[in-house]
Amino acid sequence: MRIRPSLKAKAFKESPLLAILLPATRTIPHARQELRWIREEVDNNFVDQAATSNKKTLRFQNRQIDLLRRCMLRGRKGWPLQYVLGNQPFGDSLNILCKPGVLIPRWETEEWGVKLASIVKANHEFFSDKKYSFRVLDLCTGTGCLGLLLAEQLENTQVVGMDDSPVAVSLARKNETENRLILDTRNSSFTVSKQDIFAPFNFDGLFDLVVANPPYISIQNYNDGLITSPSVRKFEPRHALVGGLEYYVRIFEIADQVNANAVVCELADKLQLDEIQSVLQNGKWNTKEMLDSAGNIRTIIAWRDQWAWMKNLA
């Protein structure tokens, strides 16, 4: 959509930075909101503790340069806001660091992760009498947002994340450090290792629950600009987006190996759900779908008979 010159002029009159942000935000109110967030992030990085006026002046100049740089990345280059800010709030109190090369956390993942934690906490015997430690395996962990969310929401829980991207593993470890105080208050932990899930590997013990947000976009949908936005294709890692049934087959193989009682995975749509369910007709798993708040099929939920309460997850 073309931006009217009069709108550009109105934004520039209020602030030149608003005019820079307009190509990405499309409206002045949205530009104001994003400029406020960008300023807050820049201010957090340039807390002035300098004792001399020269240092204060230099710090102010650097702050202005950083503010302009971020606005240019957002408005002129089209960077996703999370990459410009460098973080994304997640869960109740998590701060998830974000950087190019690693998939940005989505609200849909946050939503189903919170729901999953809530039903586990309400129904699993561990959270009433703590007979043993509760363990979660988070495959294709990316930033670590989902694993960290479960560690935040569930007390006394060990979460192990795995990813084959060294960039993602490095960032997930930084996110563990960033949020360690929060995890400590929950007596939970989150550790990450670099691991290709398709390669043979040994598991450190057994797990109660396996979760994953794997690459699930078909190559056809990835190349369709109406389904996958140009911004996603341009800036987010293709290897974290494009995939299909092979990931789910492997995830359930791993779930069997670690003797998990439930698996919850994000997916694309009903067609993909039907494909996954068709390969699980072996009597080992009960399955259903879960919708997100927009009414779209968002996850497949699978459980063994002893976890029948998982069918109430919706």
Image (spheres, grey):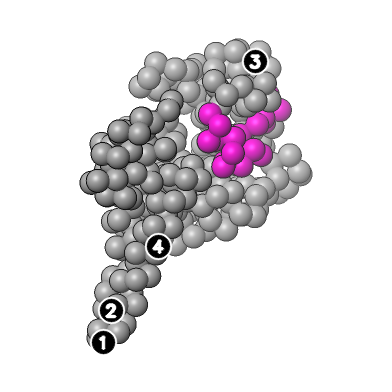
Please tell me in which quadrant of the rendered image residue 242 appears: top right
Which residue is rendered at x = 55% and y = 21% of the image?
A: 227
| Image side of residue 238 versus residue 300, left or right | right
Q: Looking at the picture, which amino acid does disc 4 mark?
A: Asp
| Image side of residue 214 versus residue 296, left or right | right
Q: Nearer the viewer, residue 175 or 228?
A: 228
Q: Which residue is mark 1?
A: 52
Where residue 9 appears, as percent x and y from the top left, is: 30, 40
**Magenta segment: does it hold 249?**
no
Q: Which residue is mark 2?
A: 56
**How dense is the environment of label 2, judged by Cα within 10 Å: few (below 14), some, or many (20 and up)?**
some
**How dense is the environment of label 3, judged by Cα within 10 Å: few (below 14), some, or many (20 and up)?**
few
Magenta-drawn segment: 229-247
Q: Which residue is mark 4?
A: 66
Asked if the residue at tag 2 contacts the one at tag 4, i.e. Cβ–Cβ closer than 8 Å, the answer is no
Mark 4 and mark 2: Cα distance apart in space: 15 Å
Seen in the picture, residue 23 relative to 223 is either above or below; the reply is below
Mark 3 and mark 2: Cα distance apart in space: 61 Å
| Image side of residue 162 versus residue 43, left or right | right
Quarter occupied by the N terminus: top left
Mark 3 and mark 4: Cα distance apart in space: 48 Å
Asked if the residue at tag 1 contacts the one at tag 2, i.e. Cβ–Cβ closer than 8 Å, the answer is yes
**How dense is the environment of label 4, judged by Cα within 10 Å: few (below 14), some, or many (20 and up)?**
some
Seen in the picture, residue 26 relative to 278 is either above or below; the reply is below
Q: Which residue is mark 3?
A: 275
Q: Tag count in the figure?
A: 4
* First-in-chain label (3 vs 4): 4
Which residue is rendered at x = 36% and y = 59% of the image?
A: 67
